Amino acid sequence: MSAPPFDRRRTPINDRVAAAHLAAQAEGRTVTAGRLGQVTVPVTDLRRAPDGPRDRQLLLGATVQIFDQYAGWCFVQAAQDGYVGYVATTDVVGTPAEATHWVSAPASHAYTEADFKSPERMALSFGSQIRVEAQGARFAKTPWGYVPHAHLRPLDARTSDPVAVAEMFLGTPYLWGGNSRWGIDCSGLIQAACLACGIECPGDSDQQEAELGAPCEPGASYQRGDLLFWKGHVGIMADADRLLHANVFHMAVAFENIHAAITRIAAQGDGPVTAHKRLSTG
């Protein structure tokens, strides 16, 4: 069977199945419309292949289209950005519960009772989506336990400042392909910041460079919220002088003087800035 001549990250086709809209390229694969699913663990790896390397991660409540289930793995496409990959079958359920709220704190917990002294049942990362079943004085009842009201926002309530969101991740450990408060990479940080502000955002830095924002003129001054791209890397400007990015040099989300960062990144062999783009948050 011939290899698919397209971007595997956004094309739901593998050696066994093809999504219905790709029927013309199926070449003997089973054609399927798939079915809805939902992530049921705090964070799960979205892998390139069964037992393969992590490409990205999906958080609790993320919806996916499941196209195939085989040998402990589901072949899925994430609703939030169209990213395609494999997740463990144990980490998804095929009957999604419609989310009503999202976790707007850097991290939170779901408790066994509506009491902060009760045992925690689950840790929740920023961006997780949950269904609130009942409201109490300080806690919301959810299928996963009781979550503090202060850590939740209604699903349609977005923020307006991507930099403020990214700053919430300061000190988060660097993790290749990471998308959570427990580990994040450069493009994961940008995606978290954008999605929280209602800005559609793909998962990888090359996709973000192609699709986010408007190009700035060469030599333009940096402004808060501007995106700077290198080959395989992205960061967001906190102000005219400081870049905020998840990076291997610090092994964390950190501020770095932009001129020092440009010099350092070039010196380590990763080349010059490839794009300076300005986000529109209106």
Image (spheres, rainbow, N blue to C red):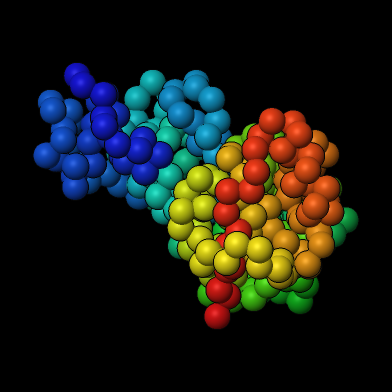
Quarter residue 17 falls in: top left
Please tell me whether residue 5 is drawn above or below residue 162 in the rendered image: above
Residue 76, horizontal then vertical, whole percent: 38, 40
Q: Is residue 121 left or right of residue 273?
A: right
Nearer the observer, 213 or 164: 213
Nearer the observer, 199 or 150: 199
Q: Quadrant of the C terminus?
A: bottom right
Please tell me whether residue 145 is drawn above or below residue 73 in the rendered image: below
Q: In this view, does 74 lie to the left or right of 238?
A: left
Please tell me whether residue 223 is drawn above or below residue 44 in the rendered image: below
Residue 134, horizontal then vertical, whole percent: 61, 71
| Name of the residue lying farthest toward the bottom | 282
Residue in the picture at 80% in, 52% down: 259
| Name of the residue lying farthest toward the front | 219
Residue in the picture at 36% in, 35% down: 8
Quarter residue 159 falls in: bottom right
Residue 44, horizontal then vertical, whole percent: 57, 38
Q: Quadrant of the N terminus?
A: top left
Residue in the picture at 54% in, 25% down: 53
Please indicate, yes or no, whether residue 137 appears anywhere in the rendered image: yes
Nearer the observer, 113 or 4: 4
Q: In this view, does 180 lie to the left or right of 157?
A: right
Residue 83, horizontal then vertical, whole percent: 43, 45
Residue in the picture at 74% in, 31% down: 268
